[in-house]
Each structure stands twice: as structure tokens, then as C-alpha cells.
Amino acid sequence: MKRIYFDNNATTRPDPRVIEKVMELAGSHYGNPSSLHFEGQQAKRILEESRRTVAAAIGAEDSELIFTSGGTEANNLAIKGVVEALAIKGKHLIASAIEHSSVRLVVNQLSQQGFEVTRLPVDKNGIIDLDFLQKNIRKDTILVSIMLANNELGTIEPIPQAAEIAHRQGALFHTDAVQALAKMSVKVDELGVDLLSVSGHKVYAFKGVGALYVRKKTPLLPTLHGGGHEQKRRAGTENLVGIASLAEAVRIMDEEGEQGKERLRLLRDRLEKGLKEKFPSAQINAESVPRVPNTTNVSFPGIDGESLLMNLDAMGIAVSAGSACKAGSTEPSHVLQAIGLSKEAARGTLRVSLGKYNTGEEVDYFLKALEQAIAQIKRGD
Ligand SMILES: Cc1ncc(COP(=O)(O)O)c(C=O)c1O
């Protein structure tokens, strides 16, 4: 059976050009970038070229980029690294209520260790409350962490405005841009952030690689201790194959430019038009606010989302019921709770996240399959 993959916010299939480039490299550039001999220096050249490519794509300087094992580690390093460095200055942190677990659980843990954490509420579309931020930021706030694009809703947060509020009080600002890269422009100076996380496998590179941007002079202590890699900020021999895959994916992303994003937008609009025509009672969440162009989050009243997911899977279609990391859990996701969706509505929610390999025909097939899948559930098949 032909499969249709509509779960690109969970992960993406690596671009064939990425695989080709990197597989060749895995055999030929096996040296340790820290070694002084030829093999080591050959690997180091790839490492530094990759750093230049990824840094340039987000408008950063090479020295401001630390490679990590993914978005999770980048988020952990950003928050724990700043907190370690600035604990003498203050013990107050702010994070939005809809952060990915790799931010949410880090700040939860810090709150058990004596830090005070303020959770920034969001409105029914998942947009943060800037007035709340303004009123709750304090002299002892050391870090504000707000994601650029939400993984479940696709909502784009007003990061430049939030970062300005943080900076006026002398706090640092981190954004998790894992779901934003390749779907919108991500430039550190336009966003005005001090720290920014990205992940390879969300942008058609390999799993197990990511990067943290750290603006020059931002205090940050390492969380992994060992060798002096990554300017002594992240110990561990670099995952050269993964890093090169990220660089190649980013190069392709830049080459595809606005056209790639526009194509996704057109597909998404076709999907949402079809959803409205076929399912008038369905509710597209966060529809009226700025969103990344590939994500549709839709609630079907009275339908169990997990059953719908399983029925669609049996028809060859992969989607997600809420966040990928929540699969298997029957509790509505924290994001859907934060936007005030009832438990009932949240349970009937699907996330469809399109990617660059998807086509209009796939969208049309999905809409037909969805009708069947919902009919099966209503009949109790
Ligand atoms: C918003 C967001 N941040 C961070 C991560 C974690 O990235 P990684 O899987 O590379 O650890 C994810 C992955 O789902 C995500 O969606």
C-alpha cells in the first residue's frame, strides 16, 4: 500500500541529496575533528564548513553556533547553561505554557531546585500574553524562553516584542525554533534573541543532530563535561555525519527559499478548504493567527482522535493526534489544554503536518479517507 506521510512536525524523511552527500562523507571523513593529523584536519574542515552554513542561514556568526545532539539538548543547554552561569544574579525564569517538553520539564525541574518559574499564558489561538509578560518580568528574571512556532498548532509567537520586554529588564531571551526553521524566516537579529535552538530531523536532515545559537558574550556554562569541544561549551566528539547532514539540508532549504514555503501554504490551504467543505462542524484551531505554512490542527466534535489516527493509518496515512511525544497518552496535550479546548474537543483533535514531498493528490486522497474513517467511527466499526 502506498503510504502518505502527513506527520512532518514529528520528523521528516531526509532529503535524498542529504543522504547522498553524507553517506559518501561517512566513509571518507572518519577522522576525529580534534586530531592534529591529516584525517583529523579533513574532518575539522567539514565541521567548520557546516558550522558556517548553518550559522549563515540564521544570520549568526560561526563562533556563535554550538552543535548538539538535537533540539532537546539545545533547549536543555540553553536553559541550564544560562541558569548555571547567572544563578547569582537571580532565580526567576519565565516560559510559555505551550513549550515542548524539552523546555517545560527543564523549568519544572529547576522550580524544584529553588528557582521560581512563571508560566506565560496563551490565548485561544496559542499566542502568548505580552501584557502578562510585561507585568510579571522582574529585576531578578534571568531568562525568558518562548518558542518561535508551536509544534501542535503551528502558531508563530511575537518573539521580537517578547525579547524586547525581556531585554528592557536585563533578562536573556531564548527561543525554541525547532518547528520554525525551513517553514519561515529565522534570523537571530530580526528576532532579537540571545539563544535559539534548531534540530536536524525536522528539516530533512538526520536525527540526533541540532544546534544552539548563543549570541556573543551571552553567559553560558556547559552541561556536559569532558573534552574541550565546541569552544568548551559542549563536550563530546562531534557527530560529523549528522552535522554535515544538517548543513546540506540547510543549504537546500536556502536554495528552495520562499517558493518551498509558498508551496506548503498552497497545499495547507487546499487541505483546510476541503476540511471546511466536507466537515462543517470541524474546528481548525489557531486558524486566524500567524502560523507556519505546513500545520493544520483540527478538532472533530464527538470523534475519538486516536481511533481516527488508527483508522487513517490502516488506510495508509500517517497523522498525529496532538503532539508526537504524547502518542499513547490519553490525556489531552498541555498545548490544547492551554488554549482552553475542552477535554472532549481535545480528544477529537488531529494534527496534520505537511512536508515538501507531499502533493495535492495526497491531500485530496486524505480528505476522502477521512470521510470514510469518520463514518467508520460513527458506525462503531
Ligand atoms: C518544538 C520542539 N522543540 C524541541 C523538539 C525536540 O527536538 P529533538 O527531537 O531534535 O530532540 C521538538 C521535537 O518534537 C519540538 O517539536
Image (spheres, helix red, strand yellow):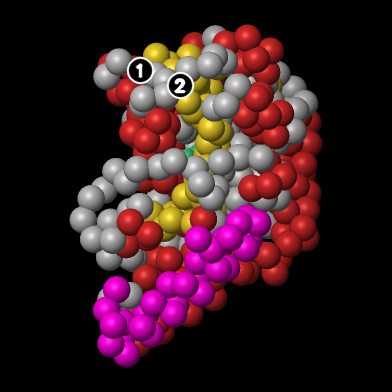
Question: Residue 322 lies in magenta, yes or no?
Answer: no
Q: CA distance from mark 1 to mark 2?
A: 7 Å
Amino acid on which disc 1 is placed: Phe
Q: Quadrant of residue 250?
A: bottom right
- Residue identifier under label 1: 115
Seen at 40% across and 51% down, the residue is 70
Figure disc tally: 2
- CB under 8 Å between discs 1 and 2: yes
Helix, strand or loop under label 1: loop
Extent of the magenta region: 34-63
Q: Could you tell me residue 196's position as x and y percent?
A: 53, 44
Residue 95, relative to residue 295: is it above or below?
above
State which image quarter holds ligand 1.
top left
Q: Please state which of residues 251 and 293 is positioned toward the viewer in this rendering.
A: 251
- Compared to residue 96, the image places residue 296 above or below, namely below
- Picture coordinates of residue 105 (x, y %)? 35, 27
Q: Is residue 145 visible?
A: yes
Label 1: how many residues lie within 10 Å, few (<14), some (14-19) or many (20+)? some
Asked whether, in this view, residue 143 is left or right of residue 183, the answer is left
- Tell me what residue is drawn at x 23 percent, y 61 percent: 227
